Image (cartoon, helix red, strand yellow):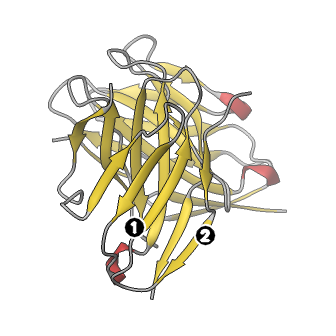
């Protein structure tokens, strides 16, 4: 069964450093999402992406965050200057199409630790 | 704005007992509702979803949930718990016109005792 993959599984970085989290969505999917889950808190929506542009973003997704689909297969989340509070599990998800309540398929997540 | 409340951050049952995990939602439009399961160090796996068809929805692994509009609830049940059901269960809502982004509850950790 096709699956969403994410790399790395765990990333440790120093505060102020840039990190790039990578996701490979299911190959024929068209809509992509990033969510994050701070330890002990809810899974929160960050951003949705369609047709090579952001379709919606949350208040969390400020100028420090960016997303890109550089080569038609990877979907990346960049944090330019990490803060301690960026420490969380980051999940990528994809769906085949919107316009219907399609199932979002989630990757296993990247645990980001900012020191 | 949509929101989800899951009553009980931790539910413990005996193997073979009924599982009941509670979820209440708030939505300004008819919602779509989802239950996901999360095993340690794994992603979220869809158990079942309500998309305005039948109010009683059957999912994988013997789980089902009933949409009750009057109670704004979407509780998850399973008649007989198995040890392999131990996991985190997340209820989520999405709305038309919201890019179908998911809004999650805080989750309920299910423990199954032998």
CB within 8 Å, label 2 to label 1: no
The residue at which mark 2 appears reads as: A10
Left-right relation of A68 to A109: left
Q: Residue B8, percent across and down?
A: 46, 61
Q: Residue B67 carries which label?
A: none
Q: Residue B26 falls in which quadrant of the image?
A: top left
How far apart are labels 2 and 1 at the CA level?
19 Å
x 48%, y 20%: residue:
A96
Vertical placement of residue B113 versus B85, above or below: below
Dividing the image into 4 quarters, which one contains the C terminus of chain B? bottom right
Q: Residue B36, percent across and down?
A: 54, 42
Q: Is residue B25 visible to the viewer in this orientation of the structure? A: yes
Q: Which of B57 and A5 is in front in this view?
A: A5
The residue at which mark 1 appears reads as: A41
Q: Nearer the viewer, residue B105 or A65?
A: A65
Query: Of the residues tagged 2 and 1, which is closer to the observer?
Result: 2
Q: Is residue B7 visible to the viewer in this orientation of the structure? A: no
x 49%, y 35%: residue:
A71
Chain letter for mark 2: A
Vertical placement of residue B91 versus A78, above or below: above
Left-right relation of B78 to A33: right
Residue under disc 2 on the same chain as residue under disc 1: yes
Of mark 2 and mark 1, the one earlier in the sequence is 2
Dividing the image into 4 quarters, which one contains the N terminus of chain B? top left
Q: Is mark 2 on a helix, strand or loop?
A: strand
Q: Residue A61, percent across and down?
A: 24, 56
Vertical placement of residue A50 versus A16, above or below: above
x 31%, y 68%: residue:
A80
Q: Residue B31, percent across and down?
A: 29, 27
Vertical placement of residue A13 versus B94, above or below: below
Chain letter for mark 1: A
Farthest residue in the bottom direction?
A115
């Amino acid at each position: 069964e096709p699956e969403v993959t994410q790399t790395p599984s765990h990333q440790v970085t120093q505060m102020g450093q840039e990190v790039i989290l990578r996701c490979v969505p299911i190959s024929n999917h068209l809509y992509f999402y990033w969510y994050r889950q701070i330890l002990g808190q809810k899974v929160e929506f960050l951003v949705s992406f369609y047709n090579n542009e952001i379709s919606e973003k949350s208040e969390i997704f400020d100028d420090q965050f960016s997303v890109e689909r550089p080569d038609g297969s990877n979907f990346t989340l960049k944090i330019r200057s990490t803060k301690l509070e960026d420490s969380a599990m980051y999940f990528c998800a994809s769906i085949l199409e919107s316009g219907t309540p399609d199932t979002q398929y989630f990757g296993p997540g990247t645990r980001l630790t900012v020191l | 704005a949509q929101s989800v409340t899951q009553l009980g951050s931790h539910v413990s049952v005996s193997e073979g007992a009924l599982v009941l995990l509670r979820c209440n939602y708030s939505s300004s439009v008819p919602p779509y509702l989802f239950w996901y399961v999360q095993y340690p160090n794994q992603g979220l796996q869809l158990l079942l979803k309500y998309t305005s068809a039948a109010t009683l929805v059957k999912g994988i692994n013997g789980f089902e949930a009933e949409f009750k509009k009057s109670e704004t609830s979407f509780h998850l049940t399973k008649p007989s718990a198995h040890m392999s059901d131990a996991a985190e269960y997340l209820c989520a809502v999405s709305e038309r016109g919201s890019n179908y982004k998911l809004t999650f509850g805080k989750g309920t950790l299910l423990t199954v005792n032998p």
